[in-house]
Amino acid sequence: MAPKEEIKKFIVDELLFGNTALLTGDDQSFLQTGVLDSSGLLELITFIENTFGIAVEDDELVPENLDSLDNVEGFIIRKRGRLNSYDPACSFHSAHP
């Protein structure tokens, strides 16, 4: 499953309790439209870290990285690229060959 689809499934199943009507588009702002509040954002970050094997650093907690499906997917792709280029023995490689 593509990162965007995994994230969407998590948000709908775990944070919106199956209400797909609240998630209207891939570029929809989670915070401006009330899809996520601060605790939902923390749950999303934990999901991202556990599912994709990346750490979300404090300076990465910005809307450009985490405020829509498109932004989250782009962040994961960029972060994976940095992991691949910096540390070939990182835990992400071990867990996901």
Image: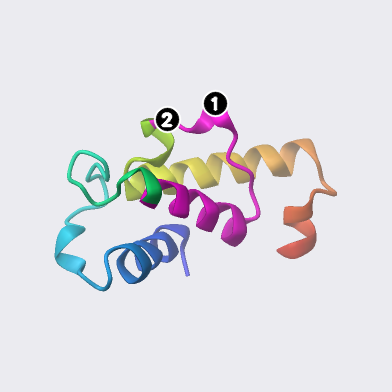
Residue 74 position, x and y percent, is 45, 43
For the point 41% across and 60% down, which residue is it? 7
- On the question of residue 97 being in view, the answer is no
**Under tag 1, what secondary structure?**
helix
Q: Which mark is residue 59?
A: 1
Magenta-span inclusion, residue 64: no
Q: Are marks 2 and 1 in contact (CB under 8 Å)?
A: yes
Residue 5 position, x and y percent, is 39, 64
For the point 55% across and 39% down, which residue is it? 78
Task: Please determine whether, in this image, residue 14 is positioned above or below residue 77.
Answer: below
Q: Nearer the viewer, residue 38 or 94?
A: 38
Task: Please determine whether, in this image, residue 71 is positioned above or below residue 58.
Answer: below
Magenta stretch secondary structure, dominant: helix
Magenta-span inclusion, residue 43: yes
Q: Nearer the viewer, residue 70 or 41?
A: 41
Per the image, the residue denoted by label 2 is 62
Q: CA distance from mark 2 to mark 1?
A: 7 Å
Type of residue at label 1? Asp
The magenta stretch is 40-62
Residue 23 position, x and y percent, is 21, 58
Badge 1, how many Cα within 10 Å: few under 14, some, many 20+?
A: few
Type of residue at label 2? Val
Q: Is residue 67 left or right of residue 76?
A: left
For the point 44% across and 65% down, which residue is it? 6
The picture quadrant where one finds residue 28 is: top left
For the point 40% across and 41% down, which residue is it? 66
Q: Is residue 34 left or right of residue 13?
A: left
- On the question of residue 31 being in view, the answer is yes
